Amino acid sequence: MKRFLTRPRTIFWSLLTLLILIIIFQNVEPTQLNLLFWSMPEMPKLLLILSSMAAGSLLTILISWEIRRARRKKIEGGSPLGTPP
């Protein structure tokens, strides 16, 4: 048991799991999203937070993938981002 609790990776994942559980249980009340002239029906605040995090993660992955592709193309001698030389 002592060895299990002294591993940094185990401590990190345990704290992260605890933090996620705290966030889940504190954000179950319904809320409404109003954006300019558009409004969404009431939904749990947690769903709004998770969908925002998922959208941000997807955007980050897509942008980093495009940057990596452009660098690889530049190293290979092609033009980056599909623009003519």
Image: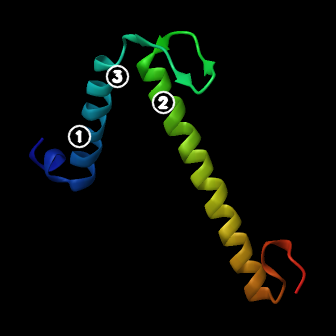
Where, by quadrant of the figure, is residue 54 drawn?
Answer: top right
What secondary structure is marked by label 3?
helix
**Mark positioned earlier in the residue sequence (3 or 1):** 1
Cα–Cα gap, marks 2 and 3: 10 Å
**Pointer 3 and pointer 1: residues touching (CB < 8 Å)?**
no
Q: Position of residue 49 (x, y in %)?
A: 45, 29
Q: Give the colour scheme shown.
A: rainbow
* Residue receiving disc 2: 50
Which badge, 2 or 3, comes first in the chain's sequence? 3
Secondary structure beneath dot 1 equals helix
Q: Position of residue 78 (x, y in %)?
A: 84, 84
The residue lying toward the viewer, choosing from 2 and 74, is 74
Q: Amino acid at mark 2?
A: Leu
Q: How dense is the environment of label 2, judged by Cα within 10 Å: few (below 14), some, or many (20 and up)?
A: few
Q: Is residue 61 above or below residue 32?
A: below
Q: Give the distance between the C-alpha atoms of the residues marked 1 and 2, in whole angstroms.
A: 19 Å
Q: Residues within 10 Å of mark 3 (few under 14, many from 20)?
A: some
Could you tell whether 23 is left or right of 30 in the image? Answer: left
Task: Find numbered disc 2 in the image and state the secondary structure of the residue it sits on.
Answer: helix
Q: Residue shown at 42%/22% (left/top)?
A: 46
Residue name at image x 78 percent, y 78 percent: 80
Tell me whether circle 1 and circle 2 mark residues in contact (CB < 8 Å): no
Q: Nearer the viewer, residue 76 or 85?
A: 85
Q: Amino acid at mark 1?
A: Leu
Q: Earlier in the sequence, mark 1 or mark 2?
A: 1
Name the one closer to the observer, 32 or 35: 35
**12 to the left or right of 62:** left
Give the labeled residue for mark 1. Answer: 15
Q: For marks 3 and 1, give the one nearer the viewer.
A: 3
Query: What's the amino acid at mark 3?
Result: Ile
Residue picked out by circle 3: 24
Q: Between label 1 and label 2, give the one nearer the viewer.
A: 2
